[in-house]
Amino acid sequence: MRSAIVSRPLDPAALLAEVSNISNGAAILFVGTVRNVNAGRAVTGIDYAAYLPMAERELAAIVAEAAQRFHTDDIVVEHRLGYLALLEASVAIAVAHPHRAAAYDASRYIIEALKRRVPIWKREEYVDGTREWVEGGEGERSERGAESGKS
Amino acid sequence: MTVTALLFASYADALGMESVRLSLPTGATVSDALERLRALPGGDRLPPAPLVAINLSYVRTDSTLTAGDELAVIPPVAGG
């Protein structure tokens, strides 16, 4: 298992390859991307910031919890910081497991815990040129699931 | 004793700084430190009970501070 907070573009396919092995019959890849509308406002991009040492520590703790709870060490999570344009990936979570149910559950556990606990913030930029920090513990903002799996 | 308070995102914007050293009496709690922060220009924009962490771990606001602690005042997180 592995987690990282990075300042370069994510490569979700590489994360999926990293967790895949012959003992796993299921692999889930979740990718959160920058969406063009939030709360009715047209978004052009998002700047991500973090309390880096704590974010790294909290993300690692979440991955370790998921590994223990769902019985797989084949988990890789990366979250990106800095300015991201529309459609760019802010977070990628790859989980592999012998069976699909636990793989789905572990993936969901990680993204929900990340959104609640990891000290990362985003400042949205809008078409009118203004910028605002997004706050309020939104669970479902600016994300879009992309999943690939077999079981 | 002295502790370092860290501010992030909207809280850093509100107070116009990302960190500030606070001199507090021995035995001071997180709440005492927050009271000091609220007295600074822009500090009135901090919420009544923000998320806080000491030395990278979330704590309650009644937690006691120790000299040299790093106290982070954490806006609602919005990762993902």
Image: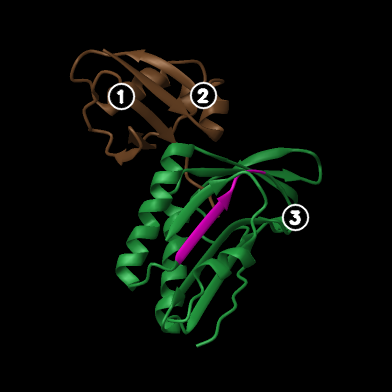
Circle 2 residue: B18
Q: Left or right: A115 with respect to B35?
A: right
Lateral position of residue A53 relative to residue B15, left or right: left
The segment highlighted magenta reads: A75-82
Q: In the image, is B11 to the left or to the right of A45? A: left
Q: Amino acid at mark 3?
A: Leu
**Residue identifier under label 1:** B69
Badge 1 sits on which subunit? B
The hue of chain B in the figure is brown
Cα distance between the residues tagged 3 and 2? 28 Å
Circle 2: is it few (<14), some (14-19), or many (20+) Cα within 10 Å? some
Determine the residue positioned at 48% across, 38% down: A52
Tint of chain A = green
* Residues tagged by mark 3 and mark 2 found on one chain of the structure: no
Amino acid carrying mark 2 in the image: Glu
Judge whether residue A77 is colored magenta: yes
> Label 3: how many residues lie within 10 Å, few (<14), some (14-19) or many (20+)?
some
- In which quarter of the view is residue B65 placed? top left
Query: What is the quadrant of residue A106 in the picture?
Result: bottom left
* x then y, percent, for residue A50: 52, 39
If you read the primary sequence from the N terminus, does the residue marked by circle 1 or circle 2 appear first?
2
Q: Is residue A54 above or below residue A80?
A: above
Q: Amino acid at mark 1?
A: Asp
